[in-house]
């Protein structure tokens, strides 16, 4: 498997800033994976994303895109990437279909607009001006625009923010299908459910530095408590019992409850990604 992006010792400072916003970060994004960049507001996530899509170029360090120096790649780069910013970008006085046809005109190859809009539940509203769309409709149309050119790499920011659970599930299913077909995704979000359901690996960005790069599973193992909690019924009352995970199979008290009690729930001491976010970044995302 190829490396989509290889970033080494990346630094960046805005012209109006006295200090670097990105402070020597290094990471790889593998082809065919969903890579999540997480962190509090102002940590450098959006700046990193803008650098990777060539909106910001005055950086130091090395960025390779499938082995090629990113700075040396011409405008053909934009044929290969799709971008969905957190704030939807549309022409409000044009209809949704007019918007999609306009954006499709920038690319050599595009997906079927009708199929995409049908998938996200917008085709029946294709002739409605985008200015009359709800926030959730604009978010869904923004995702269609991001994948309109059948990109090799997809950059998405808060892709389900403002969506109801059904529409959020549709978008996440489409992202998962895109990855299954070989697509690469660079995701930034504060929604830990999206991270847990989608990401193969995540990195935490804090004050321009990367604190952790790992899989969601390994992070939960690292920060979780190695214990098991059982809730069981006895004499009409719900009781709780807590056991260490080590050698639990030979724990007599645990075995007695499992064999003889009416079990209601069993939980491992798994720490949520939201809790891990707070531990790693020191910032509460609520």
Image: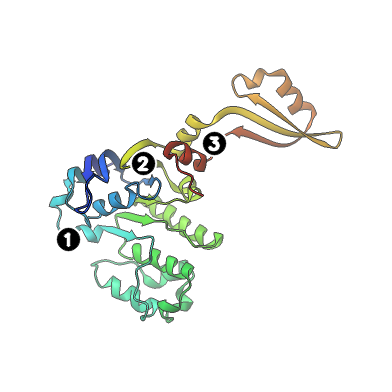
Dot 2 crowding, Cα within 10 Å, few <14, some 14–19, many 20+:
many
Q: What residue is disc 3 on?
A: 271
Task: Residue 63 in the image: state x and y as whole percent.
Answer: 20, 44
Nearer-N-terminus badge (2/1) = 1
Distance Cα–Cα, label 2 vs label 1 = 31 Å
Residue 75 marker: 1
Task: Residue 85 in the image: state x and y as whole percent.
Answer: 35, 60
SS under mark 1: loop
SS under mark 2: strand
Nearer-N-terminus badge (3/1) = 1
Specify the quadrant of the image occupied by residue 204: top left
Q: Is residue 229 visible?
A: yes
Q: What residue is disc 2 on?
A: 206
Task: Residue 2 in the image: state x and y as whole percent.
Answer: 27, 42
Q: Determine whether label 3 and label 1 are within 8 Å by CB.
A: no
**101 up-or-down from 136: above or below:** below
**Which residue sits furthest right?**
235
Q: Residue at the spot x=76%, y=23% of the render?
A: 256
Residue 45 marker: none
SS under mark 3: loop
């Amino acid at each position: 498997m190829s490396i989509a992006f290889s970033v080494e010792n990346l630094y960046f400072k805005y012209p109006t800033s006295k200090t670097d916003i990105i402070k020597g970060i290094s990471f790889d994004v593998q082809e065919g994976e969903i890579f999540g960049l997480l962190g509090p507001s102002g940590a450098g996530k959006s700046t990193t994303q803008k650098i990777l899509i060539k909106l910001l170029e005055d950086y130091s360090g090395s960025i390779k895109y499938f082995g090629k120096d990113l700075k040396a790649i011409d405008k053909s780069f934009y044929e290969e990437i799709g971008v969905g910013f957190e704030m939807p970008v549309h022409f409000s006085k044009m209809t949704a279909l007019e918007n999609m046809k306009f954006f499709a005109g920038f690319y050599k190859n595009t997906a079927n607009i009708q199929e995409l809009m049908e998938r996200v539940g917008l085709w029946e509203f294709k002739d409605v001006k985008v200015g009359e769309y709800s926030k959730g409709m604009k978010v869904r149309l923004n995702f269609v625009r991001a994948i309109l050119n059948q990109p090799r790499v997809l950059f998405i920011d808060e892709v389900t923010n403002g969506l109801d659970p059904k529409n959020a599930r549709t978008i996440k299913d489409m992202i998962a299908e895109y990855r299954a077909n070989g697509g690469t995704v660079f995701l930034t979000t504060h929604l830990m459910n999206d991270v847990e359901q989608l990401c193969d690996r995540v990195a935490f960005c804090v004050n321009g530095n990367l604190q952790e790069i790992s899989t969601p599973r390994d992070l939960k193992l690292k920060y979780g408590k190695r214990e098991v909690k059982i809730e069981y019924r006895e004499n009409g009352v719900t009781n709780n019992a807590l056991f260490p995970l080590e050698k639990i199979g030979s724990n007599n008290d645990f075995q007695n409850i499992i064999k003889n009690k009416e079990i209601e729930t069993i939980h491992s001491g798994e720490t949520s990604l939201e809790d891990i976010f707070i531990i790693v970044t020191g910032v509460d995302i609520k």
